[in-house]
Image (cartoon, rainbow, N blue to C red):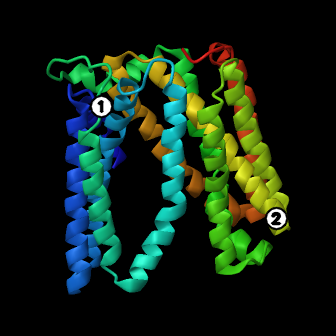
Amino acid sequence: MDLLTPLRRHGAEAADRKRVVQLCQLAEALTALFLAFGAYAGWLTVTQIFVATAVLGTAGAFESPATAALLPLITPQGSLQRATALSSGATQVATITGPALGGLAYAVSPGLPYGIMVLFWLLGTLFTGAIHAIQPAIPKGSATPGDLFAGVRFIRGNPAILGTISLDLFAVLFGGVTALLPIYARDILAAGPSGLGVLRAAPAVGALVMTVLLARLPIHSRVGMRMFQAVIVFGAATVVFAVSHWMWLSLLALALLGAADTVSVVIRFSLVQLATPDEMRGRVGAVNFLFINASNQLGQFESGVTAALFGAMPAAVLGGVATIAVALLWMKLFPTLRDVERLE
C-alpha cells in the first residue's frame, strides 16, 4: 500500500498521534476477526483474503509513520537511541516467535492464528491508549496540496537525512540475501526445511543480541562513521554467507549480518528523528517507510533476477560487494552524514 504515502504523511501529523495508531490497530483487529470467522466457518475465499490483506496494508500505511513520529514524543531527552534499540528488539522478538506461534496455532485450527492476531491487536490498542507523551505534538492546521510533498522537499534540502534514507534504500536493495535462503538450504547447504527455519531465524537472533548491547551501551561518538562501518560489515557478512558451504559459518554470517543491520537501523532512525522538526516527522517518516518497503521488496526481486541469471552464489556475492560499494560511495557523496559525531 505504498501508493498511500502522500496521504499518510498528513495522517501522521495529527495532533493526537495515539488516536491514529489506535484506529489503525482497531481496523487490523476487525480484519483479523473477519478472517478468523471465515476460516472457522469454511467460507473464506482467496479473493476475500486478498481484500483483507489490502485493508491490513492500508491500515499499516497510516500506522507506521504515526508510530515513528510518536516515539520521540514519549522518549526522555537523550534516550532516543536506547528507545529505538528496544523498539527494534521487540520487532526481532516478533520476527522470531511470530511464525512459530502461528504454525503451532494453525496445527490446532486454521482460524486460531487469526484469533491470536485479534487478541494482540486489541491489546496493542489498549497499550497505545496508555502511552503518555512527554512532549505534546505541535498542532497543525488543515492540509493543503503543498503539504502532501512537504516531506520530500524537506528531505531534499537536508543532505544528512537524504543520505541516510537513500543509503538504506540502496544497501537493502543489493543486500537482500535472505530471499535466497530457500535455495541455499536445499542446494548448497543441504539443510532441508528445518535448516531453512534456523537460517531464517539467525539474522533475527543476531539483531536481538545487538539490540540488548545497544540498549545498555549506546553509541556516543562518531555515529555517522559507525553507521557506514555497519553497512560495510553487513555487505562483508553477506559475501561470507554467499561462499560458505558450512552450516555453522553460514549461521554465524547471518547472525553478524543481522547485528550489523541493527546498528545501522538504530543510527539511521535516530538521525532522521532528531534532525527533523516535530511538525515534519510524520511526513518524513512516511517517505522513510516508503523507501524501506520499496528497498525490501525490490531487493528480493533483484536477488531473484540475478540468481536466475548467474546462479544463487554469484548473485549473493554480487549483492554483498554492491552493498560495500554503496557505503563507500555514500561516504564520499555525503560527507556531512559521515562526519556526524553524536546523536543529539
- Residue 31 lies left or right of residue 151; in this view the side is left
Instruction: Tell me which residue sits at (29%, 45%) in the image.
Output: 127
- Asked which quadrant contains residue 214, the reply is top right
Instruction: Say which element carries label 1.
Output: helix
Q: Residues within 10 Å of mark 2 (few under 14, many from 20)?
A: few
Residue 248's disc is: 2
The relative height of residue 153 versus residue 247 in the rendered view (above or below) is above
The relative height of residue 222 versus residue 288 in the rendered view (above or below) is above
The relative height of residue 316 versus residue 312 in the rendered view (above or below) is above
Q: Nearer the viewer, mark 2 or mark 1?
A: 2
Residue 333's disc is: none
- Asked if residue 1 shows in the view, the reply is yes
Rounded to the nearest angstrom, the CA distance separating label 2 from label 1 is: 44 Å
- Residue 231 lies left or right of residue 141; in this view the side is right
Percent from the top left, x then y, of residue 8? 28, 36
Instruction: Tell me which residue sits at (39%, 34%) in the image.
Output: 68
Q: Residues within 10 Å of mark 1 (few under 14, many from 20)?
A: many
Percent from the top left, x then y, of residue 71? 39, 31
What residue type is disc 2 on? Answer: Trp
Q: Nearer the viewer, residue 28 or 310?
A: 28
Instruction: Say which element carries label 2.
Output: helix
Q: Which residue is mark 1?
A: 9
Instruction: Tell me which residue sits at (35%, 37%) in the image.
Output: 67
The relative height of residue 336 versus residue 46 in the rendered view (above or below) is above
Percent from the top left, x then y, of residue 282? 33, 28
- Asked which quadrant contains residue 342, the reply is top right
Label 2 or label 1, whichever comes before in sequence order: 1
Percent from the top left, x then y, of residue 88? 52, 43
- Asked which quadrant contains residue 306, the reply is bottom right
What residue type is disc 1 on? Answer: Arg
- Asked if residue 53 shows in the view, the reply is no
- Residue 155 lies left or right of residue 37; in this view the side is right
